Amino acid sequence: MTDSMLLGEVEITRVFEQRTAAMPRESVFPDSAQHWQDNRDLLVPDFWQPDTDQVLFSMQTWVLRSGGRTILVDTGIGNNKERPYMPLFAHLDTDYLGNLARAGVRPEDVDVVVCTHVHGDHVGWNTRLVDREWVPTFPNARYVFSRADFDYWNPDNARTTRSGRRMQNVFEDSVAPVHRAGQTVLWEEQYEIDGALRLTPAPGHTPGSAVLTLRSGTDQAVFVGDMLHSPVQLAVPDCGPSFDEAPAQAADTRRRVLGWAADNTALVLPAHFPGTGAAEVRRAGTGFAVQSWAGFSPA
């Protein structure tokens, strides 16, 4: 077991901010208790604690080394963030940058930061607090956002969102500073990072949610962000979390992307799966099942 693997010519490394975090199942997946009982063998012990009815997550970044560049996929929660309506994300003091350093990545080494969507646990380490000011953590990087999410979560646009107050301060402290620094790339229909890596829209969780597809040699993979929060959504793709802005659209996106992954033997890498963190999937009845788990070290 390892925290790195090679797909084609792209190296993938898993770097944790938090190895495990827990939230009440009913708050994340309301009205879904039977789905969890029906899939108990899939979910216990890595993804669900049935005695406390807690869903288990990891907070992590996928580090890609491709074409001579270092690329981060999602940057977690961040330290010192003021999150009055998301206490799990508030005032953290983790050794995330130390974990990156142990994986051989210094902030100045990062060339591209991919944000699969703009939520507080995916953009937090975009910035860090220096002399009471939020500054870009990765000074030489281009930060890549979908324009749809950038516009949707920009408070200047005064959107009414399902997430509501849970997103308080996120754009202001983790997105706006890198935009002011001139380090953002806002894409629309698709965005090609290099010949192996391409971002495409995957709306539903947020309007601008995206998946990052890897094709290198004979290997394929897809980094799905929060399209999946738990393997229960493989078995029951219509089972969505309370964080989805457009639940029906999110379910359609899950079915489409998982269908592509199953048909193309592509590794699926969600943002928050503990355990070994990623899997190949196959079609199974009206949903999907795990064909095999990836060889990353368990969380």
Image: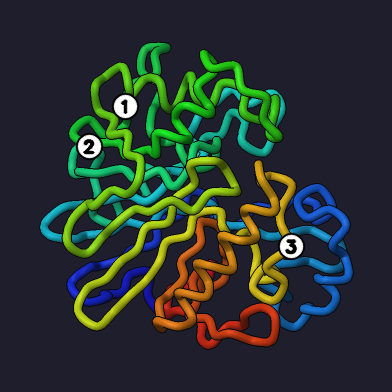
Based on the displayed image, in which of its 4 quarters is residue 251 positioned?
A: bottom right
Amino acid at pointer 1? Pro
Side of 181 relative to 51 (left or right): left
Amino acid at pointer 3? Cys
286 relative to 57, above or below: below
Residue 136: mark in rendering: 1
Query: Which secondary structure, mark 3?
Result: loop
The one of 69 and 281 positioned closer to us in this rendering: 281
Q: Earlier in the sequence, mark 3 or mark 1?
A: 1
219 relative to 90, above or below: below
Residue 61: mark in rendering: none
How far across and down, in percent of the image, does residue 125 sit?
42, 36
Q: CA distance from mark 2 to mark 1?
A: 9 Å
Which residue is under mark 2?
A: 141
Based on the displayed image, in which of its 4 quarters is residue 41 positioned?
A: bottom right
How far across and down, in percent of the image, does residue 8 sit?
21, 76
The one of 154 and 178 positioned closer to us in this rendering: 154
Q: Earlier in the sequence, mark 2 or mark 1?
A: 1
Query: Which secondary structure, mark 1?
Result: strand
Q: Earlier in the sequence, mark 2 or mark 3?
A: 2
Q: CA distance from mark 2 to mark 3?
A: 36 Å
145 relative to 66, above or below: above
The one of 95 and 199 positioned closer to us in this rendering: 199
Residue 239: mark in rendering: 3
Crowding around mark 3 (Cα neighbors within 10 Å: few <14, some 14 to 19, many 20+) is: many
Q: Are marks 3 and 1 in contact (CB under 8 Å)?
A: no
Marks counted in the figure total: 3
Query: Which secondary structure, mark 2?
Result: loop
How far across and down, in percent of the image, does residue 34 sit?
88, 70
Residue at 40 percent across and 81 percent down: it is 264
